[in-house]
Image (cartoon, rainbow, N blue to C red):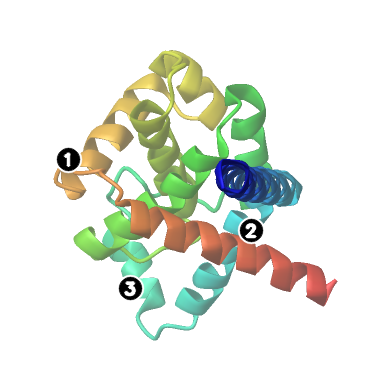
Amino acid sequence: MSTNTFNSENLSYLEEEEEEEEEEETRNQSEKEKGKNNKTEEIKDSNIDIVNSISEALTLILEENKKLKNYKEMIVKQSKMIFSSKSIPSISLYDYLKRIQKYTQLERSTLIITLILVDHICEKAHLTLTYYNIHRILFGAIVISIKFNEDSIYDNRYYAEIGGVRLNELKLIEYTFLTLCNFNVYVKEEEYEHYKNYLEGFYEMSQLDN
């Protein structure tokens, strides 16, 4: 009786051990899969040319805006703003963004926030993006996004040189941008994820077209 009882308890203990081992193995496998998925996401992110996606997305908006009946009127109306250039800059949006990225080592998250802030100012200030104002609006959004999102920050003189504007112009661009946004540049997590997914999808579509 005692031996049988002992064996029964021993088997029960072994079964519990086996169950614990199986659970541990399942947890380890789950962690491995999670790690693989995270690594896949990192690889996916690193392969996406986010500068190209942003420049192409903004170019589509610019071309759509050109079709507006009051497009020329909007250019004249907005011409007195610090964002407007007297002539269309010769450098493309892509090359402009690449230049800024090269000399500031912009984080991907900063670029995504930049696009969000461009949308915010257009919505809040009722601005129409044109080929005359896009570079300076974009540049203002980048400088503000850097200061909002990154740890390493250069002084405004350096940013002005990179962006191709005078120091006093950059200060006014930054101040005007913040004023029109009511000094609110907070970005919600769900909004960030929405734009991130949009840019990733935009990139994938462009690859299919190629």
Q: Which image quarter holds the C terminus?
A: bottom right
**Foreground: 39 or 97?**
39
Q: Name the residue that disc number 3 marks.
A: 73
Disc 2 is placed on an element classified as helix
Q: Earlier in the sequence, mark 1 or mark 3?
A: 3
Residue at image coords 68%, 45%: 25
**Foreground: 21 or 137?**
21
Q: Is residue 188 above or below residue 141?
A: below
Disc 3 is placed on an element classified as helix
The disc placed on residue 53 is: 2
**Foreground: 183 or 99?**
183
Q: Name the residue that disc number 1 marks.
A: 183
Q: Say what amino acid the circle numbered 3 marks.
A: Glu
Q: Residue placed farthest to the front in the image?
A: 1
**Foreground: 5 or 67?**
5
Residue 117 placement (x, y as % from top left): 35, 50
Residue 122 placement (x, y as % from top left): 31, 61
Q: Say what amino acid the circle numbered 2 marks.
A: Ser
Q: Earlier in the sequence, mark 3 or mark 2?
A: 2
Q: CA distance from mark 1 to mark 2?
A: 27 Å
**How many neighbours does mark 2 have within 10 angstroms: few (below 14), some (14-19), or many (20 or more)?**
many
The image quadrant that residue 99 belongs to is top right
**Badges 1 and 3: C-beta atoms under 8 Å apart?**
no
For this view, does 161 lie left or right of residue 192? right
For this view, does 99 lie left or right of residue 117? right
Q: Nearer the viewer, mark 1 or mark 3?
A: 1
Q: CA distance from mark 3 to mark 2?
A: 29 Å
Q: Is residue 41 above or below residue 64?
A: above
Q: Say what amino acid the circle numbered 1 marks.
A: Phe
Q: CA distance from mark 1 to mark 3?
A: 28 Å
Residue 131 placement (x, y as % from top left): 51, 59
